[in-house]
Image (tube, rainbow, N blue to C red):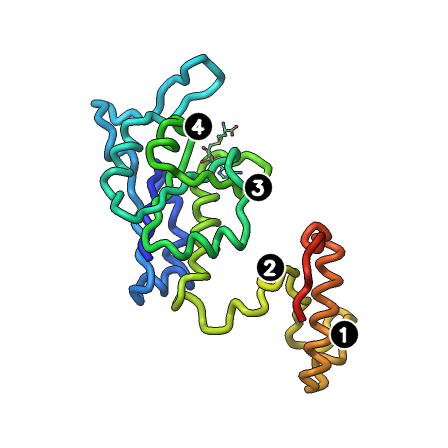
Amino acid sequence: MKIDILTLFPESFAPFKESIISRAQKAGTIEINIINIRDFSRDKHKKCDDYPFGGGAGMLMSVQPIFDAVKSVLKEGSKVVFPTPVGKLYNNKTAQKLAEFSHLIFICGHYEGIDERLVELFDAEEISIGDYVLTGGEIPTMAIVDSLLRFVPGVLKEGSLNEESFSNGLLEYPQYTRPQIFEGLEVPQVLISGNHAEIAKWRKAASLEKTKKNRPDLLKGEKIED
Ligand code: SAM
């Protein structure tokens, strides 16, 4: 899987030089390129913003540098993604779908966003990471890329995804590590019993309880698998 990220702030992507994502790049499982949109500006001062038609408080990103930057990496089968508050709400299913593409191109918006014609021209998938507004598309892009890469074969250890939150429609059960008693709170006895059937039963019930408490919306109309 190859991912090209177009941004005015390439240094924001330092977290991709760490941990699992960094290891997957070094192993050649994935390739991530950070592309500076400003390098494509034909303006003599490398300007990348402009006034929106119709007026308004803020500026918009200039259309030409983004268009040329996308064109420089676009090939047959590429999927263009534009993280934006007006997009469809992102979730685990979308992450899995995106992980099936061999090439993704992300456009990081800034200021008031991008010219709508770019969405049309590249048939960009508009994705929102939540009902709030961030100052730029770098954090949403990082969240989307990080979460979808977990579904690319070879990025995580085999089996790591099996009991994760959302994998079976529920949130994950609570987990504990040593010591057995911490600040007067004890680890549930069943988890140190060594009885795997009982542990599985406890985890299923605890997972359901956590989901009911924090995300009852996930339970609506859902059939819970055993
Ligand atoms: N004027 C836009 C609006 O009201 O919908 C907000 C623009 S925001 C200040 C700048 C950029 O941040 C957006 O173009 C987008 O790339 C990114 N962004 C902000 N919030 C986001 C969200 N919830 N999901 C995805 N991207 C977001």
Q: Is residue 211 left or right of residue 139?
A: right
Q: Circle 2 sits in a helix, a strand or a loop, which is it?
A: loop
Q: Earlier in the sequence, mark 1 or mark 3?
A: 3
Residue 192 position, x and y percent, is: 70, 83
Q: CA distance from mark 1 to mark 3?
A: 36 Å
Given residues 123 and 135, the one toward you in this image is 123
Given residues 149 and 169, the one toward you in this image is 169
Mark 4 residue crowding within 10 angstroms, few (<14) / some (14–19) / many (20+): some
Residue 111: numbered disc: 4
From this view, report whether residue 1 is shown above or below residue 117: below
- Determine if the C-beta at disc 4 is less than 8 A from ligand 1: yes
Q: CA distance from mark 1 to mark 2?
A: 27 Å
Q: Residue at x 51, y 70 (%)?
A: 160
* Tag in front: 1 or 3: 3
Residue 130: numbered disc: 3
Q: Circle 1 sits in a helix, a strand or a loop, which is it?
A: strand
Residue 166: numbered disc: 2
Residue 150 position, x and y percent, is: 45, 61
